[in-house]
Amino acid sequence: MSKRINNSCEVLIVGGGVSGAAAAVAAARCGMQTVLVERDSFLGGAGYSGLHQYICGLYLNGEDIPVETLNKGIVREIVSLLNKLSPQRTIKKIGQVYVLPYSGEDLAFAFSSLCGNEKNIKVFFNASAAEVKKKSRTITEVVFYQSGIMHRIYPGILIDCTGTGDISAMAGAGFELSPSGKRQLAGFTVRLKGLKDSTEILSIKVPYYLAQAVNKKLLPAYLRFTTFSTGETAGEGFCKINVGGPDSVKREQTVRKDALKMIKYLAKKLPSFKDAYITETSLRVMEREGRRVCGEYTLTEDDVLNAGKFDDGVVKNSWPIEIWDKKKGTIYKYVKSGDYYEIPFRCLKARGIHNLLLAGRCISVTHEALGSTRVMGTCISLGGVAGKAAAHYIEKGEYPLEDKFSLK
Ligand SMILES: Cc1cc2nc3c(=O)[nH]c(=O)nc-3n(C[C@H](O)[C@H](O)[C@H](O)COP(=O)(O)OP(=O)(O)OC[C@H]3O[C@@H](n4cnc5c(N)ncnc54)[C@H](O)[C@@H]3O)c2cc1C
């Protein structure tokens, strides 16, 4: 029989993306024996492997340049660590929003340092959670595998930070999943070098030439929604390919081949692309939308656009609803300038399971509201809140009361 290891902990977090790593740090700082289980070999999840250029959802969008992040806590600490690691990267306004340029390496390093400083955190990398057992409405056991070894873990409370809501689904929690035609497009980013005169104008020219190629059936239709942005160094640029359809190995292989075709086509049409070559891609085609687990409240588009405030509001956000649509491309709907909405704690409480919390991309929101809540700045803050609330649950046997919420 293969080896089995049994263990218990107070707080178990599945998923070491930005929300999971933040949740682990927050729980450990409250004195909790914390276990973090991550399928990949790094912290930061999509924030590391997605080749994103900016952390969104950190600041209040308005006239004045923000001096601080909208939310306090771990998110502010992360920003300060990133500033120390790369002081040249400072807050930037793009259109109506403020973002923080960053590198995935810095982000993963910042989270590794924070987790490494907490003696109460044990991280299992390359470890996949596979099964959840419940007694009545309480999770009693989670099974995960690491290097062929089966681990059974008996947690006091579980936080789902898988992005996809995998662990909640395993626990039998209800969830919403948009049909693949309505789901937000997934993304695959390629980093290019060797561009000549890589100016902002390319962000208009690239989609224009790609639309022409699609109309002439020289390239597949989905490449029409590819965006281009310049990089930080001379000759560097990023193409973000946006693709629909179900997640599959075939889709991944197709997108990788089409990315090469696309760059060859652009090299023929645009002198700036003549010597361009791909230096790096995102780890895989990355999903923007997955399961949205049903919580005690479901945040809606109206809540976001009307800057809704709640007695149990725990995270503030001013990021617009950003939908990557299969037919229309990108659609933005903005929160009133200078204002923000709140995410109530009830969106983090899985409906019907006492000791299951949600953080990051899989919280209880509608398809539209997810277009705003899913950005990294918000996910880090959600993780921090979930970690603290989990500690409260372990210590007091209940979550903080909604009208006396003390986690803000
Ligand atoms: C194409 C694209 C572009 C984006 N661009 C930006 C941008 O520019 N700026 C921005 O702020 N945001 C951007 N986002 C959004 C952002 O990256 C994510 O929504 C956010 O990082 C989600 O964080 P998370 O912690 O909820 O989940 P994730 O980062 O997805 O982390 C979940 C983690 O859980 C792990 N996991 C899952 N299942 C299991 C399991 N069973 N066992 C163990 N581990 C498991 C995964 O390996 C992963 O590391 C973009 C997203 C996409 C897809």
Image (spheres, rainbow, N blue to C red):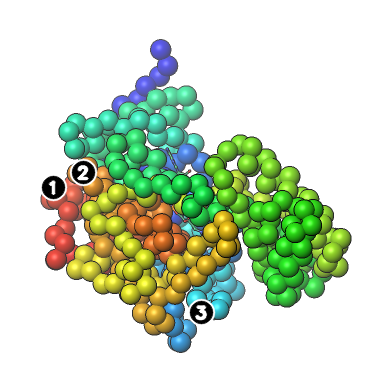
Q: How many residues crowd mark 3 within 10 Å: few (<14), some (14–19), many (20+)?
A: few
Residue type, numbered disc 2:
Gly
Are there few (<14), some (14-19), or many (20+) residues within 10 Å of tag 1? few
Give the residue drawn at x 51%, y 79%.
96
- SS of the residue at dot 1? loop
Distance, label 1 to label 3, CA atoms, is 43 Å
Asked if disc 2 is less than 8 Å from ligand 1, the answer is no
Q: Which of 342 and 91 is in front in this view?
A: 342
The residue that disc 3 covers is 96
Q: Position of residue 148 (x, y in %)?
A: 47, 24
In the rendered image, residue 377, in percent from the top left (x then y), is placed at 43, 64
Q: Which residue is drawn at 56% across and 69% down?
A: 101
Q: Which of marks 1 and 2 is nearer the N terminus?
A: 2
**Residue with the mark numbered 2:** 352
The image position of residue 132, as x and y in percent, is 31, 32
**Amino acid type assigned to the residue bearing label 3 in the image:** Gln
